């Protein structure tokens, strides 16, 4: 039985073929046109439409690396359904390795966007109107901002049964229950009835092989479970579930020495790190205020008072 015609960005996508389209964003001040490449693989058989998207923040390159490897391994070629890959969503930020759009806005706080707003808002509106309605499932790949290094994790709403089921199938080291952030891509897609997984892993401006491997294997699992590709699920130990968490912040400024490994379980009063001055006169230990798992560490060598240092689960 043949699929119905699939019209994407005004073009009919043929069955059983690779199609590459350009989403036109704007022109640079040099009059150079900026396009976002979109890679579409449609099978000959009906099935779900899955969107794999990375680089909504231009400096979060691990996600770009994950989708690049998925394409390299041909995991984006489905036996059933359609897989859409957008390896670099914020092409402006990616070009100069910054988080924001040229207008200084965080694209992930501009959804669903407006037709006559800022550049970021107009781009968000274009995605919301022309692409989002066509997809069934979305995996949105992120990293920690700046030097904040996230353990590989899936974030989803605890009461979203479909997303939670797929998060378990993804089988990351950790599943973090978090509410949608207003005007984020996940919030908009959720309100449209789409099932969304938000992957976090590593930090900005890196290609971390461990994180990329986690993202590729997890995505493969999800595509297998949804019936788009064939294969056997890769399963490790049961993920750690994070229900409640707190950022531990620097009480002083200074050089930051990390004493624990990301992903580890630590006990109350365990030393997590040390803040010290360059002259050997000051040293302040950072203690765990409760038992819990460390799932994000700020890897910056110099910290200021009030900086977020460790994201830690609050275990009862």
Image: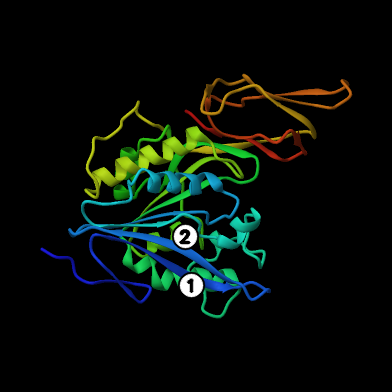
- Residue 270: where, in percent of width, then height? 62, 19
- Mark number for residue 267? none
Judging depth in this view, the residue of 301 and 156 nearest the camera is 301
What quarter of the picture does the N terminus occupy? bottom left
Residue 218 visible here: yes
Left of 216 or right of it: where is 271?
right
- Residue 24: where, in percent of width, then height? 50, 72
The residue identified by callout 2 is 185
**Spatial distance from mark 1 to mark 2, Cα to Cα?**
11 Å
Q: Is residue 120 above or below residue 64?
A: below
- Residue 172: where, in percent of width, then height? 40, 35
Q: Is residue 39 above or below residue 28?
A: above
- Residue 228: where, in percent of width, then height? 24, 50
Residue at x 43% of width, y 69% of height: 128
The residue identified by callout 1 is 125
Tell me the crowding category of disc 1: few under 14, some 14 to 19, or many 20 or more residues within 10 angstroms, Cα based: many
Judging depth in this view, the residue of 306 and 58 nearest the camera is 58
Callout 1 secondary element: helix
Q: Residue furthest left?
A: 1
Residue at x 23% of width, y 38% of height: 231
Q: Is residue 175 above or below residue 223?
A: above
Left of 37 or right of it: where is 236?
left
On the image, which quarter does residue 290 sit in? top right
């Amino acid at each position: 039985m043949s699929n119905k015609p699939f019209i994407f960005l005004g073009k009919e996508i043929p069955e059983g073929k690779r199609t590459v389209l350009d989403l036109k964003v704007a022109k640079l001040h040099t009059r150079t046109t900026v396009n976002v490449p979109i890679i579409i693989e449609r099978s000959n058989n009906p099935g779900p439409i899955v969107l794999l998207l990375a680089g909504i923040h231009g400096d979060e390159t691990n996600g770009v690396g994950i989708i690049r490897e998925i394409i390299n391994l041909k995991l984006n070629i489905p036996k059933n359904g359609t897989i859409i890959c957008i390896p670099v969503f914020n092409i402006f930020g990616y070009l100069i390795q910054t988080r924001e759009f040229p207008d200084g806005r965080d694209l992930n706080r501009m959804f669903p966007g407006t037709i006559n707003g800022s550049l970021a808002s107009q781009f968000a509106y274009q995605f919301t109107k022309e692409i989002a309605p066509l997809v069934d499932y979305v995996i949105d790949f992120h990293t920690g901002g700046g030097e904040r290094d996230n353990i590989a994790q899936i974030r989803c709403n605890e009461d979203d049964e479909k997303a939670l089921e797929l998060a378990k199938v993804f089988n990351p080291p950790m599943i973090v229950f978090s509410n949608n952030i207003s005007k984020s891509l996940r919030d908009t897609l959720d309100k449209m009835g789409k099932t969304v997984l938000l992957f976090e892993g590593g930090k900005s401006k890196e290609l971390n092989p461990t994180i990329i491997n986690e993202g590729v294997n997890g995505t493969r699992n999800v595509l297998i479970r949804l019936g788009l590709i064939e294969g056997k699920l890769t399963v490790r130990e049961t993920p750690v579930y994070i229900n409640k968490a707190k950022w531990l912040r620097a009480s002083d400024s200074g050089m930051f020495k990390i004493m624990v490994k990301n992903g580890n379980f630590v006990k109350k009063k365990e030393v997590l790190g040390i803040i010290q001055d360059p002259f050997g006169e000051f040293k302040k230990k950072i203690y765990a205020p409760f038992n819990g798992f460390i799932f994000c560490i700020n890897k910056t060598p110099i910290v200021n008072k009030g900086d977020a240092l460790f994201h830690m689960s609050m275990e009862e």
